[in-house]
Amino acid sequence: MKSVTEPKRIVVVGGGVGGMVAAWEAQRAARELDLPVTITVLEQRDRVGGSIVTEDIDGCLVEGGPDCFVSEKPWGLQLVRELGLADALSATNDDRRKTYVYWKGKLHPLPDGLILLVPTRVMPFITATLFSWPGKLRMALDLVLPRRTDGADESLGDFIRRRLGRETLDKLGEPLVAGIHSGDPETMSVRATFPRFVDMEREDRSLILAMLKRMKAARAARARAALGAAKVTMFMTLTGGLGRLIKALEHDVGPDALVTSTRVQSVERSADGAWTVRTDTEACWAADAVIVAAPAYAAAAMLRAAAPALAEELAAIPYVTSATVTLAYDEATFPRDPDGFGVVIPKAQNRRIKALTWVTSKFYGRAPEGTVLMRTFVRPNDQAGNPLDEPALIAAATEEIAHIVGVTAAPRWARAFRWDRAMPQYVVGHLARVDRIDEELTSLPGLALAGGAYRGSGIPDTVRHSREQARRVVQALAPPGD
Ligand SMILES: Cc1cc2nc3c(=O)[nH]c(=O)nc-3n(C[C@H](O)[C@H](O)[C@H](O)COP(=O)(O)OP(=O)(O)OC[C@H]3O[C@@H](n4cnc5c(N)ncnc54)[C@H](O)[C@@H]3O)c2cc1C
């Protein structure tokens, strides 16, 4: 029989930022409740961090996955501050805040005042070269169109076409969604990926009027977030890269809690409600609670026997593969001043890259003087659907940059990262599915799901969701009355 003081055992499956934050929050919550716990994070790779990986190449800072997070959702900034990294927070170089759209062989600057897809200033919009006159008039129609009232979910493509017209979808909506979610707007749920658009239409009818109203509030929120510290821009990062976030979590969670190179095969539940986590090393962990922070399809495979209905819902969340390539060029060989944050390339242009970030222009301190650093999102498969390996990804990125930016010199070096099935796709109906998943979990005490697969796929939402889940698990383990 267990003694009263025996620590509760919590196993976290998956050591991405979701799993690491869940472990960190579970430790904090247990300390607050004076509840003795042992926490173990099981990660299949030989490192924690999941898609967050920062490397130093030749004095340049290379982000393999995420390179920044939005500040409007406060949970990323909050975590950074709680981890003691406030001094490392770094704004983007907003003097150079300009984005181009590659359309019919030319780079068109997005008009000033265009926020997400919504124009908020008249003159820059009227003079913009990207949109045709019928396209501009169709966008402006948003001012008078009625709101949709049935409350049903719809695809982002349908939503944008309905409010702002087809041209906005093709030139802006599609590359934006491809850039953020590697997704297809015709299948993505507007409610799950851009809930604020739905709120804006519900509350203010017109997206343009709603955006004007909200810009003021957003500026005030950013000023509040800064609280006398460093400037806070729409996107924030860390000096030294987002890998520092993972390092800080690793430090706090402690090396004894981290078990890498260990792939979880199943999470089982016995009749008395205890959990067993089995791995491919034949080691198995007994647990009072398990937080699964692996991708949803991996969670489905682990839970198939213990919770078949839950596993079925999890397996239905689709994922896509993406790839980034970072390239370093000698500034002297670069044909133009990279005077912006980057370029998005709509699918209709049939290029092999989806987006291009001018890293040394967008962020501070990423490369020594005289080096231009570029990062591209490359389409990860060839036209026949075969996966591209690293040399092929680098070749595609180099050729496309030569074509789009006009640089003919070879890069000094390039580094590719392939992310197989790393991006969950919130398709139409996603939130209803996650509600069903939560419902299934109510009959599985001691089991929680965390990470970016469920209620927001970027870093801030992943942090929020993982902290909430960890706290819930610890509270349920505490004796009644605590
Ligand atoms: C290329 C790319 C760029 C991105 N850019 C941004 C950005 O700029 N800003 C932003 O906010 N977000 C960005 N994101 C999204 C961001 O990366 C996610 O929000 C975040 O990484 C989700 O964390 P996670 O822990 O849920 O998942 P992951 O990072 O995928 O971690 C899951 C972990 O589970 C492990 N695992 C899987 N199966 C098992 C198993 N059977 N046993 C043990 N371990 C297992 C994996 O190895 C992995 O470490 C980007 C994502 C990608 C792929």
Image (cartoon, rainbow, N blue to C red):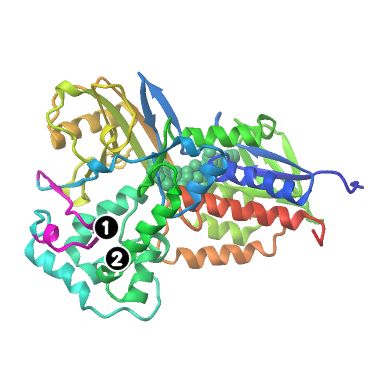
User: Residue 119 colored magenta?
Assistant: yes
Residue picked out by circle 2: 211
Q: Is residue 44 magenta?
A: no
**Whether residue 121 is situated above or below residue 5 in the rendered picture:** below
Q: Is residue 56 above or below residue 37?
A: above
Q: Which residue: 69% across, 30% down?
A: 256
Q: Residues within 10 Å of mark 1 (few under 14, many from 20)?
A: some
* Left or right placement of residue 475 versus residue 428 in this view: right
Q: Which residue is mark 1?
A: 115
Q: Earlier in the sequence, mark 1 or mark 2?
A: 1
- Look at the image and give the residue range highlighted in magenta: 105-126
Q: Residue at x 53, y 40 (%)?
A: 16
Residue type highlighted by circle 1: Ile
- Taking 217 as reference, is 135 left or right? left
Q: Position of residue 378 (x, y in %)?
A: 29, 38
Q: Nearer the viewer, residue 124 or 399?
A: 124
Residue depicted at x 25% and y 68% = 208
